[in-house]
Image (spheres, coloured by chain):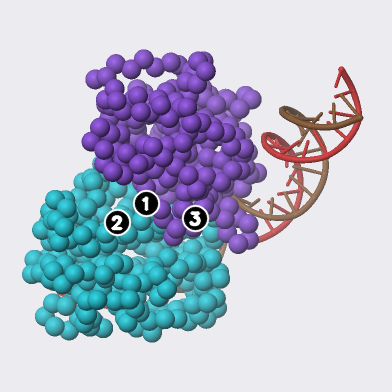
Chain colours: A cyan, B purple, C brown, D red
Amino acid sequence: MTAVSFQKSPREPFMFIERVVRRYVSLRPLSEYEIGLLRGLASRRETHPSGWELSNDGRPSARRIIVDGWAGRTRVLPDGRRQILALLLPGDAVGICTPPNPQALSSTIALTPLLTVDATALNDALLRRDPRCAGIHEAFAIIGGLNEVMLLDQIVRLGRQTAYERTAHLLLELRERLVVVGMVQGDTFVLPLTQDQMAETLGVSVVHMNRTLQQMRRDHLIETKRGHIKLLDLKSLAVIADFRQRWPSASTLPQSALANRKTR
Amino acid sequence: MTAVSFQKSPREPFMFIERVVRRYVSLRPLSEYEIGLLRGLASRRETHPSGWELSNDGRPSARRIIVDGWAGRTRVLPDGRRQILALLLPGDAVGICTPPNPQALSSTIALTPLLTVDATALNDALLRRDPRCAGIHEAFAIIGGLNEVMLLDQIVRLGRQTAYERTAHLLLELRERLVVVGMVQGDTFVLPLTQDQMAETLGVSVVHMNRTLQQMRRDHLIETKRGHIKLLDLKSLAVIADFRQRWPSASTLPQSALANRKTR
DNA sequence: CGAGGTTTTGAGGGGACTCAAAACATGTGG
DNA sequence: CCACATGTTTTGAGTCCCCTCAAAACCTCG
């Protein structure tokens, strides 16, 4: 199995790319060649301001992988109501290995300042089904499935859960996704979204979002300070949200990734 | 273009299969061979009672295409709340060309008595990438995209629209999908769902679903009788729902009434 | 030290929910 | 062909979750 040395958090000039490596390796062991290829992407990085449009109506303006910052697929109604359909975190890709879908009527927008790498090289390799990238190809297939699962989760949240439950569910999902890329310490992680953006994700008003978070603080479920959030009681949160683990857990993870999993 | 003779509605011993042909041909021209292959599936048909489980937790118990009746992907919360994630109509497939996704935690259930055909033969041909089935293969790719779009639509409905708007949007979506398979006459079609099932789809209570439909009748937007529904004013419905055309079809969308957007 | 964005608070309203029961359908068996 | 059982649609009443409007308090930073 490939021995990959992960750093807890990037300190070298550009170690953010390790998040991408971690993400894929957590799904599927990769060859040295593939990991090298991914690391090579780090040289072609770029920053975008908050609000930057990564794709418009399903037509990706570029094929990029987010290595820092958050983005969201959004849809806007004529009267201004806005819905964030899905959140994109470091390690997530835009326009790679996915056929353009103009019908989606959604655009992908940077919700915070973003750091991305150009991945056209990778995309090309995948399109021509380069056998040396079979592992990454497979990882993308798995990611496609997970993306669908997240859409379904979002539907259940919006359709059947209260604001309180939705919030709990989203926080647990975010934690799980961030763990994979090494962005959770203890049960604390950076939550760079404004309450307004969370509200737009969860289909509630800002005011109510705020009150819901207050209630969760009073209930000793979360603690927030300066952009960081700490989940104080994963068990209770999971019960409240009916949250079930989605990401490959220790039991289903390939051995190579086992070493780097925190259990809980 | 292959000249395919469509029947308005099946009268021959088994013409339901033409719905499947229509569906695919509407997306992508098919070869005679492919159409023959599809028609051949008709011999292996089967009926299932309402409630029948076509797939469990993303593990399809079979690879089948629905030719009559409706089904739904559903998820149930521990306390009994149920959400219908997506509706499957005649022409829609289960477990074909889609990798199993156990994480989805959803099952596909017959919402009405169902008539399906076994499509393992087709599935196999697609898996081994039989070049003679390239057209169908492409059609499935397009369908995959449309399915994602429908999930996004569902998210917007549940997250940002009122019950009234949601209902209008769903009815327009259903009409568009049914037109493709030849199941709409004028603007009337069979709506075999109970109000309870519609409520579970749209994330509202049965009672509210009922009152919303009543309001739409009073507003002369719809007319219902004995399982049939007639959309009386497509343009107004489209404005109310912010519905934009997804399928290749006729009607368009000026504007007239913004009456009950937020009412009821 | 303001400027502009974000978070909080307050007040009032309405959409949607629950509980409950009646009114209607539909289908089954006698 | 009617009586009964079961399922679906309607109504009514009371409640509360969440919304909107508005303004104040709080950052964060140039």
Q: Residues within 10 Å of mark 2 (few under 14, many from 20)?
A: some
Amino acid type, mark 3: Asp
Q: Is residue A94 above or below residue B92?
A: below
Residue A134 sits in quarter: bottom left
Query: Which residue matches tag 3?
Result: B57
Residue B17 placement, left or right of B227: left
Query: Which residue matches tag 2?
Result: A141
What residue appears at the point 39 percent right and 43 percent down from the top-left corner? B96
Q: Nearer the viewer, residue C27 or B161?
A: C27
Q: Nearer the viewer, residue A162 or C6?
A: A162
Q: Nearer the viewer, residue A118 or B123?
A: B123
Amino acid type, mark 1: Pro
What residue appears at the point 38 percent right and 28 percent down from the top-left corner? B38
Image coordinates of residue A258 in percent, x first then y, are 34, 78
Q: Are marks 1 and 2 in contact (CB under 8 Å)?
A: yes
Q: Is residue B250 above or below residue A12?
A: above
What residue appears at the point 14 percent right and 56 percent down from the top-left corner? A130
